[in-house]
Image (cartoon, grey):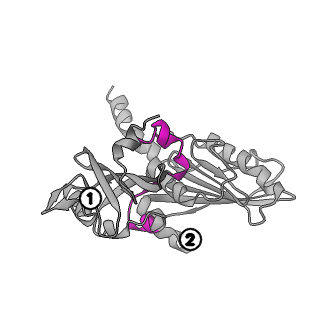
Protein backbone atom coordinates (compact mmCIF):
# COMPACT_ATOMS: atom_id res chain seq x y z
CA UNK A 1 0.00 0.00 0.00
CA UNK A 2 2.83 2.37 0.88
CA UNK A 3 4.46 1.67 -2.51
CA UNK A 4 1.34 2.80 -4.38
CA UNK A 5 1.11 5.91 -2.21
CA UNK A 6 4.66 6.96 -3.09
CA UNK A 7 4.06 6.08 -6.75
CA UNK A 8 1.01 8.36 -6.73
CA UNK A 9 3.06 11.20 -5.23
CA UNK A 10 6.00 10.72 -7.60
CA UNK A 11 4.03 10.17 -10.80
CA UNK A 12 3.70 13.89 -11.71
CA UNK A 13 7.46 14.32 -11.23
CA UNK A 14 8.18 11.26 -13.32
CA UNK A 15 5.93 12.55 -16.10
CA UNK A 16 7.68 15.93 -16.00
CA UNK A 17 11.05 14.22 -16.32
CA UNK A 18 10.03 12.13 -19.33
CA UNK A 19 12.27 12.42 -22.36
CA UNK A 20 10.88 13.30 -25.75
CA UNK A 21 10.45 10.13 -27.81
CA UNK A 22 12.11 10.76 -31.19
CA UNK A 23 10.81 9.81 -34.59
CA UNK A 24 12.20 6.69 -36.25
CA UNK A 25 12.36 4.90 -39.60
CA UNK A 26 9.27 2.99 -38.54
CA UNK A 27 7.29 6.21 -38.71
CA UNK A 28 8.54 7.08 -42.20
CA UNK A 29 9.87 4.00 -44.02
CA UNK A 30 10.18 6.00 -47.26
CA UNK A 31 12.60 8.51 -45.72
CA UNK A 32 15.99 8.79 -44.07
CA UNK A 33 15.29 9.71 -40.44
CA UNK A 34 18.32 11.20 -38.75
CA UNK A 35 19.30 10.53 -35.17
CA UNK A 36 18.01 12.95 -32.55
CA UNK A 37 20.30 15.56 -31.00
CA UNK A 38 19.35 16.90 -27.56
CA UNK A 39 20.30 20.33 -26.22
CA UNK A 40 20.09 21.31 -22.57
CA UNK A 41 19.83 24.82 -21.14
CA UNK A 42 23.60 25.34 -21.16
CA UNK A 43 23.83 24.41 -24.84
CA UNK A 44 20.78 26.33 -26.01
CA UNK A 45 22.55 29.71 -26.62
CA UNK A 46 24.85 27.91 -29.09
CA UNK A 47 21.81 26.71 -31.03
CA UNK A 48 19.54 29.77 -31.19
CA UNK A 49 19.73 33.52 -30.73
CA UNK A 50 16.34 33.31 -29.00
CA UNK A 51 17.72 31.35 -26.04
CA UNK A 52 16.90 34.16 -23.59
CA UNK A 53 13.24 34.02 -24.62
CA UNK A 54 12.98 30.24 -24.18
CA UNK A 55 14.77 30.37 -20.83
CA UNK A 56 12.50 33.16 -19.56
CA UNK A 57 9.44 31.04 -20.32
CA UNK A 58 10.91 27.95 -18.68
CA UNK A 59 13.01 25.74 -20.95
CA UNK A 60 13.92 22.12 -20.26
CA UNK A 61 15.36 20.47 -23.37
CA UNK A 62 15.39 20.75 -27.16
CA UNK A 63 15.42 17.76 -29.49
CA UNK A 64 16.38 18.23 -33.15
CA UNK A 65 16.04 15.74 -36.02
CA UNK A 66 16.29 15.90 -39.79
CA UNK A 67 14.15 13.85 -42.14
CA UNK A 68 15.03 13.44 -45.81
CA UNK A 69 12.78 12.18 -48.55
CA UNK A 70 13.82 11.83 -52.16
CA UNK A 71 12.33 15.21 -53.03
CA UNK A 72 12.11 17.00 -49.68
CA UNK A 73 14.07 17.77 -46.53
CA UNK A 74 12.69 19.03 -43.21
CA UNK A 75 14.04 19.80 -39.76
CA UNK A 76 12.08 18.91 -36.62
CA UNK A 77 12.59 20.92 -33.42
CA UNK A 78 10.77 19.92 -30.25
CA UNK A 79 11.21 22.31 -27.32
CA UNK A 80 10.20 20.73 -24.01
CA UNK A 81 8.99 23.57 -21.79
CA UNK A 82 8.13 23.57 -18.09
CA UNK A 83 4.39 24.22 -18.57
CA UNK A 84 1.76 24.23 -21.32
CA UNK A 85 1.50 28.02 -20.81
CA UNK A 86 5.20 28.33 -21.62
CA UNK A 87 4.87 26.28 -24.81
CA UNK A 88 1.86 28.35 -25.82
CA UNK A 89 3.78 31.53 -25.04
CA UNK A 90 6.58 30.63 -27.45
CA UNK A 91 4.03 29.62 -30.08
CA UNK A 92 1.96 32.78 -29.65
CA UNK A 93 5.01 35.01 -30.21
CA UNK A 94 6.22 32.97 -33.19
CA UNK A 95 3.14 32.07 -35.26
CA UNK A 96 3.00 34.38 -38.29
CA UNK A 97 1.69 34.29 -41.84
CA UNK A 98 -0.41 31.21 -41.11
CA UNK A 99 -2.16 29.68 -44.10
CA UNK A 100 -4.08 27.34 -41.79
CA UNK A 101 -4.64 27.33 -38.04
CA UNK A 102 -5.97 24.79 -35.54
CA UNK A 103 -5.34 21.85 -37.88
CA UNK A 104 -4.20 19.18 -35.42
CA UNK A 105 -4.55 21.02 -32.14
CA UNK A 106 -6.19 24.14 -30.76
CA UNK A 107 -2.93 26.05 -31.12
CA UNK A 108 -1.10 25.40 -34.37
CA UNK A 109 -0.06 27.31 -37.48
CA UNK A 110 0.74 25.94 -40.92
CA UNK A 111 2.66 28.23 -43.27
CA UNK A 112 4.83 27.81 -46.35
CA UNK A 113 8.12 27.29 -44.58
CA UNK A 114 7.00 26.02 -41.18
CA UNK A 115 4.44 24.16 -39.13
CA UNK A 116 4.26 25.19 -35.45
CA UNK A 117 2.22 23.90 -32.57
CA UNK A 118 1.87 24.37 -28.83
CA UNK A 119 1.00 20.85 -27.74
CA UNK A 120 0.95 20.47 -23.98
CA UNK A 121 4.46 21.15 -22.69
CA UNK A 122 5.90 20.90 -26.20
CA UNK A 123 6.53 23.68 -28.69
CA UNK A 124 6.88 21.87 -32.01
CA UNK A 125 8.52 23.46 -35.07
CA UNK A 126 8.74 21.61 -38.37
CA UNK A 127 10.44 23.66 -41.05
CA UNK A 128 11.83 23.51 -44.54
CA UNK A 129 14.30 25.95 -46.08
CA UNK A 130 12.82 25.34 -49.55
CA UNK A 131 9.16 25.54 -48.56
CA UNK A 132 8.36 23.33 -51.53
CA UNK A 133 5.02 21.66 -52.04
CA UNK A 134 6.71 18.30 -51.42
CA UNK A 135 8.09 19.47 -48.07
CA UNK A 136 4.80 21.07 -47.01
CA UNK A 137 2.96 17.83 -47.72
CA UNK A 138 4.90 16.20 -44.87
CA UNK A 139 4.38 18.83 -42.16
CA UNK A 140 1.11 17.54 -40.77
CA UNK A 141 2.00 13.85 -40.94
CA UNK A 142 5.27 14.50 -39.07
CA UNK A 143 3.48 16.59 -36.44
CA UNK A 144 0.88 13.84 -36.05
CA UNK A 145 3.58 11.23 -35.46
CA UNK A 146 5.25 13.44 -32.82
CA UNK A 147 1.97 13.96 -30.97
CA UNK A 148 1.11 10.25 -31.07
CA UNK A 149 4.50 9.30 -29.62
CA UNK A 150 4.44 12.10 -27.02
CA UNK A 151 0.87 12.52 -25.70
CA UNK A 152 0.38 15.72 -23.70
CA UNK A 153 -2.23 17.38 -21.52
CA UNK A 154 -4.05 20.06 -23.51
CA UNK A 155 -3.76 23.67 -22.35
CA UNK A 156 -6.92 25.17 -20.86
CA UNK A 157 -7.03 28.93 -21.22
CA UNK A 158 -7.95 30.95 -18.12
CA UNK A 159 -11.02 33.15 -17.87
CA UNK A 160 -12.16 35.15 -19.72
CA UNK A 161 -10.51 33.90 -22.92
CA UNK A 162 -13.06 31.17 -23.55
CA UNK A 163 -15.90 33.70 -23.76
CA UNK A 164 -17.33 33.85 -27.31
CA UNK A 165 -15.98 37.32 -28.16
CA UNK A 166 -12.46 36.58 -27.00
CA UNK A 167 -12.41 33.03 -28.34
CA UNK A 168 -13.23 34.34 -31.81
CA UNK A 169 -10.10 36.56 -31.64
CA UNK A 170 -7.86 33.83 -30.27
CA UNK A 171 -5.31 34.19 -33.07
CA UNK A 172 -4.37 37.53 -31.48
CA UNK A 173 -3.83 36.01 -28.02
CA UNK A 174 -0.30 35.88 -26.62
CA UNK A 175 1.19 34.66 -23.36
CA UNK A 176 4.08 36.69 -21.94
CA UNK A 177 6.09 35.85 -18.83
CA UNK A 178 8.70 38.58 -18.62
CA UNK A 179 10.33 41.57 -20.27
CA UNK A 180 12.06 39.54 -23.00
CA UNK A 181 8.71 38.17 -24.14
CA UNK A 182 7.18 41.63 -23.95
CA UNK A 183 9.96 43.02 -26.12
CA UNK A 184 9.21 40.30 -28.69
CA UNK A 185 5.52 41.22 -28.77
CA UNK A 186 3.57 44.09 -30.34
CA UNK A 187 2.30 45.36 -26.98
CA UNK A 188 3.66 48.87 -26.19
CA UNK A 189 3.89 48.33 -22.45
CA UNK A 190 7.60 47.95 -21.73
CA UNK A 191 7.67 51.03 -19.52
CA UNK A 192 4.71 49.76 -17.47
CA UNK A 193 6.51 46.60 -16.38
CA UNK A 194 9.94 47.90 -15.40
CA UNK A 195 10.89 46.07 -12.21
CA UNK A 196 7.58 44.17 -12.21
CA UNK A 197 7.44 40.37 -11.86
CA UNK A 198 4.46 39.16 -13.88
CA UNK A 199 2.92 36.82 -16.41
CA UNK A 200 0.00 37.69 -18.66
CA UNK A 201 -2.34 36.71 -21.44
CA UNK A 202 -2.99 39.66 -23.75
CA UNK A 203 -4.74 40.34 -27.04
CA UNK A 204 -5.63 43.04 -29.52
CA UNK A 205 -9.37 43.64 -29.92
CA UNK A 206 -11.56 46.16 -31.72
CA UNK A 207 -14.69 48.14 -30.96
CA UNK A 208 -16.78 50.36 -33.27
CA UNK A 209 -14.33 53.23 -32.72
CA UNK A 210 -10.84 51.72 -32.75
CA UNK A 211 -8.57 48.86 -31.75
CA UNK A 212 -7.61 48.36 -28.12
CA UNK A 213 -5.53 46.11 -25.87
CA UNK A 214 -6.90 43.76 -23.22
CA UNK A 215 -4.91 41.60 -20.80
CA UNK A 216 -5.19 39.30 -17.81
CA UNK A 217 -2.08 39.99 -15.72
CA UNK A 218 -0.88 37.89 -12.80
CA UNK A 219 1.73 39.37 -10.45
CA UNK A 220 4.22 37.56 -8.28
CA UNK A 221 3.36 39.74 -5.28
CA UNK A 222 1.14 42.63 -4.23
CA UNK A 223 4.10 45.02 -4.46
CA UNK A 224 4.46 44.13 -8.15
CA UNK A 225 0.78 44.92 -8.73
CA UNK A 226 1.03 48.29 -6.99
CA UNK A 227 4.18 49.16 -8.92
CA UNK A 228 2.46 48.32 -12.22
CA UNK A 229 -0.67 50.32 -11.36
CA UNK A 230 1.49 53.29 -10.43
CA UNK A 231 3.44 53.12 -13.69
CA UNK A 232 0.15 52.82 -15.61
CA UNK A 233 -1.23 55.95 -13.94
CA UNK A 234 -3.87 53.94 -12.09
CA UNK A 235 -3.06 55.27 -8.62
CA UNK A 236 -3.74 58.56 -6.88
CA UNK A 237 -1.70 59.41 -3.80
CA UNK A 238 -0.55 55.80 -3.80
CA UNK A 239 -4.12 54.42 -3.80
CA UNK A 240 -5.37 52.44 -6.85
CA UNK A 241 -8.10 54.03 -8.97
CA UNK A 242 -10.24 52.02 -11.45
CA UNK A 243 -9.50 54.07 -14.58
CA UNK A 244 -7.55 57.03 -15.89
CA UNK A 245 -6.89 59.19 -18.93
CA UNK A 246 -3.14 59.61 -19.33
CA UNK A 247 -1.34 62.78 -20.38
CA UNK A 248 -0.68 61.30 -23.82
CA UNK A 249 -4.37 60.67 -24.46
CA UNK A 250 -4.73 56.99 -23.53
CA UNK A 251 -7.60 55.49 -21.57
CA UNK A 252 -6.62 52.77 -19.09
CA UNK A 253 -8.78 50.69 -16.77
CA UNK A 254 -8.30 47.72 -14.49
CA UNK A 255 -10.46 45.26 -12.56
CA UNK A 256 -9.31 43.07 -9.68
CA UNK A 257 -9.74 39.34 -10.30
CA UNK A 258 -8.04 38.05 -7.15
CA UNK A 259 -5.25 39.16 -4.82
CA UNK A 260 -2.59 38.71 -7.52
CA UNK A 261 -4.52 39.05 -10.79
CA UNK A 262 -6.16 41.90 -12.69
CA UNK A 263 -7.82 42.56 -16.02
CA UNK A 264 -6.23 45.55 -17.79
CA UNK A 265 -7.46 47.54 -20.78
CA UNK A 266 -5.85 50.30 -22.83
CA UNK A 267 -7.56 52.19 -25.64
CA UNK A 268 -7.56 55.51 -27.47
CA UNK A 269 -11.15 56.22 -26.45
CA UNK A 270 -12.85 55.18 -23.18
CA UNK A 271 -14.08 51.60 -23.44
CA UNK A 272 -14.93 49.68 -20.26
CA UNK A 273 -13.68 46.21 -19.39
CA UNK A 274 -17.29 45.17 -18.74
CA UNK A 275 -18.00 45.73 -22.46
CA UNK A 276 -15.35 43.06 -23.19
CA UNK A 277 -16.62 40.61 -20.59
CA UNK A 278 -20.33 41.18 -21.25
CA UNK A 279 -20.75 42.53 -24.79
CA UNK A 280 -24.18 43.57 -25.94
CA UNK A 281 -25.56 41.93 -29.06
Check disc 2 and report the residue beneath it. Answer: 48
Check disc 1 and report the residue beneath it. Answer: 244
Which comes before the other along the chain, label 2 or label 1? 2
Residue 57 belongs to the span the image colors magenta: no
**Label 2 to label 1: alpha-carbon separation:** 41 Å
Callout 2 secondary element: loop
User: Based on the displayed image, in which of its 4 quarters is residue 132 positioned?
Assistant: bottom right
Residue at the spot 38% in from the left edge and 40% down from the top edge = 277
Q: In this view, does 138 lie to the left or right of 225?
A: right
Q: Residue 24 carries which label?
A: none
Residue nearest the observer in this picture, 130 or 214:
214
Q: Quick check: can you spot residue 41?
A: no
Q: Position of residue 44 (x, y in %)?
A: 52, 68
Residue at the spot 35% in from the left edge and 66% down from the top edge = 249
Residue at the spot 26% in from the left edge and 62% down from the top edge = 228
Foreground disc of the pair 2, 1? 1
Callout 1 secondary element: strand
Q: Where is residue 104 in the image (x, y as percent from the top left)?
A: 65, 41
Q: Where is residue 117 in the image (x, y as percent from the top left)?
A: 60, 50
Q: Is residue 222 left or right of residue 265?
A: left
Does 269 appear above or below 148?
below
Q: In this view, does 231 lie to the left or right of 150?
A: left
Residue at the spot 87% in from the left edge and 58% down from the top edge = 70
* Residue extent of the magenta highlight: 156-183
Amino acid sequence: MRFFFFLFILMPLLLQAQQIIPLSRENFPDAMVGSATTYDIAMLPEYTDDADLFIEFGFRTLQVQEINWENAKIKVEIFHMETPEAAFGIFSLSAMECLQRDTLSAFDCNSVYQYQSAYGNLYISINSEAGSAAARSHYVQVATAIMQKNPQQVLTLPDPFNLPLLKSRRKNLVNIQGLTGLQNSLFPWQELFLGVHFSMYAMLLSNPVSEFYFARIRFLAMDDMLLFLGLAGLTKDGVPVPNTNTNDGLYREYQQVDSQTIYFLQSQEPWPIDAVLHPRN
